[in-house]
Image: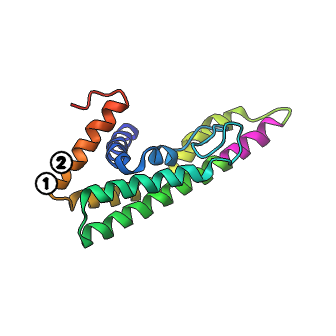
Amino acid sequence: MKSRFSSKFSSAALIASLALGSAFAVAQPAGPGMQGARMGAHGGHGHAGKGEEHFAKRMEALKSKLNLNATQEAQFSAAQAATRSAMDAGRDARMKARDTARAELQKADPDLAMLLTQRESLRDANAAQRKAAIAEWSKFLGLLTTEQKAVVKSQLVNRMQRMGGSGS
């Protein structure tokens, strides 16, 4: 079940990455004490706005290339909102997990087993938001014309090549 969900999410995340860049990666839970993409190099929040700024730019770039009709525009907005919700939930959960890990590690006898299992619990807690975002993007993709799908395909191939995949 885990691998089925993971591969399904990975496929949708790859498609959505055209507009989102690393946004879906941000929505994925990090392990205890790990810093999310929105955290600064030293655990601060100095770059918190950059992820959202990049997200917005990627969204606008994709929208302009696709020349969406009103129905597609509405669904694109719904998918974007669901993605932001998943990103926010993931970020909040990671920050809570980080705080929990820091507090636990301050103890003389920390519960290391709890820290070990925290990642899985975090993933499960945010699954609903991630699934909602995937569902909204799937609806959006279903509304695309053949020409728009060709634009998406081209963007996917280019992105995969930049990421070191074959993309052909």
Q: Which mark is residue 167?
A: none
The quadrant of the picture occupied by the N terminus is: top left
| Residue at image mark 1 | 146
29 on left or right of 64: right
Above or below 133: residue 40: above
Q: Which mark is residue 150?
A: 2
19 on left or right of 93: left
Q: Is residue 124 magenta?
A: no
> Majority secondary structure of the magenta segment?
helix
Can residue 30 be seen from the camera position used here? Answer: yes
Decide which of 77, 63 is in the foreground and name it. 63
Query: Which colouring convention does the figure follow?
Result: rainbow
In the image, residue 117 lies at what x, y percent? 61, 38
The amino acid type of the residue labelled 2 equals Ala
In this view, the residue farthest toward the left is 146
91 on left or right of 46: left
Decide which of 130, 88 is in the foreground and name it. 88
Q: Residue at x 73, y 46 (%)?
A: 99
In the image, residue 49 lies at what x, y percent? 59, 53
The magenta stretch is 97-106
Above or below 77: residue 20: above
Decide which of 23, 127 is in the foreground and name it. 23
In the image, residue 41 lies at what x, y percent? 67, 36
Decide which of 88, 109 is in the foreground and name it. 88
